[in-house]
Image (cartoon, rainbow, N blue to C red):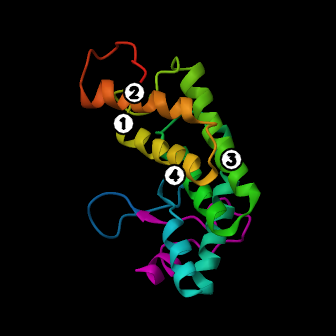
Amino acid sequence: MAQHRRDIDQDHGRPGTHKLSGGQFYEKGHWHGNYYFPTPSHTWLGGPIIHWLMTGDEGSLEAARLGRDFLARQRLETWDGDWGARIPGWTADNFLWLWWAFGDPKDLSRAEAILANFERLETEKYGARGFIINEQYKPRSEQPWMLNIVANAVGRHAVLTGSNRFHGLLGRMLAFFRNRCLERSVPNAPVKPF
């Protein structure tokens, strides 16, 4: 599976500066053969990183580095909130994996810039209530499953760095999950802090 991910699922065929170079292909839907171009929301680097750490496989190391370059070219520190929170969530999480494995401070800075931008949108546009709304999805939706991807990245940041920089965001997100998803309280009620 690691070889398939490394050699087949990753775009190796375009010049290194092409927007899609290094991204991960995926299939859209429930049948084989419905190719979809590489996107940040479907590029995961934890597998190649772990495979490289366990085996020393240079191809997996290359896949992780190409994925890093792909994600860096996407400029998700300026994400506008469209098409769902998984986009910045997976990207920040990938940069945290990269920083953990390789120690490049640029990867940590990228992850923090993406999380800070998410928090800015969550605060300025949605009133610091622990969520953003996917404005492009019809009907407009909070999509808690996507927000959970961001919460995972925020938690990983806290664990790996020991920083409390995003604790306020994580607390608001956890309150949102509890109040709106688990307890199903009044839909537009103010989010109660933990």
The first of marks 2 and 4 along the sequence is 4
Q: Secondary structure at mark 2?
A: helix
Q: Amino acid at mark 1?
A: Pro
Q: Which residue is mark 1?
A: 144
User: Marks 2 and 4: which is nearer the front?
Assistant: 2
The first of marks 4 and 3 along the sequence is 3
Marks 4 and 1 sit apart, C-alpha to C-alpha, by 14 Å
Q: Amino acid at mark 4?
A: Trp
In the picture, the disc for residue 75 is: 3
User: Residue 42, percent across and down?
Assistant: 47, 58
Q: Secondary structure at mark 4?
A: helix
User: Marks 1 and 3: which is nearer the front?
Assistant: 1
Q: Is residue 25 above or below residue 55?
A: above
Q: Which residue is mark 2?
A: 175
Q: Secondary structure at mark 3?
A: loop
The first of marks 1 and 3 along the sequence is 3
Marks 2 and 4 sit apart, C-alpha to C-alpha, by 21 Å
User: Residue 75, percent across and down?
Assistant: 68, 47
Q: Which residues are magenta?
A: 1-26
Q: Is residue 172 above or below residue 111?
A: above
In front: 65, or 16? 65
Q: Which residue is mark 4?
A: 90
Q: Amino acid at mark 2?
A: Ala
Marks 1 and 3 sit apart, C-alpha to C-alpha, by 24 Å
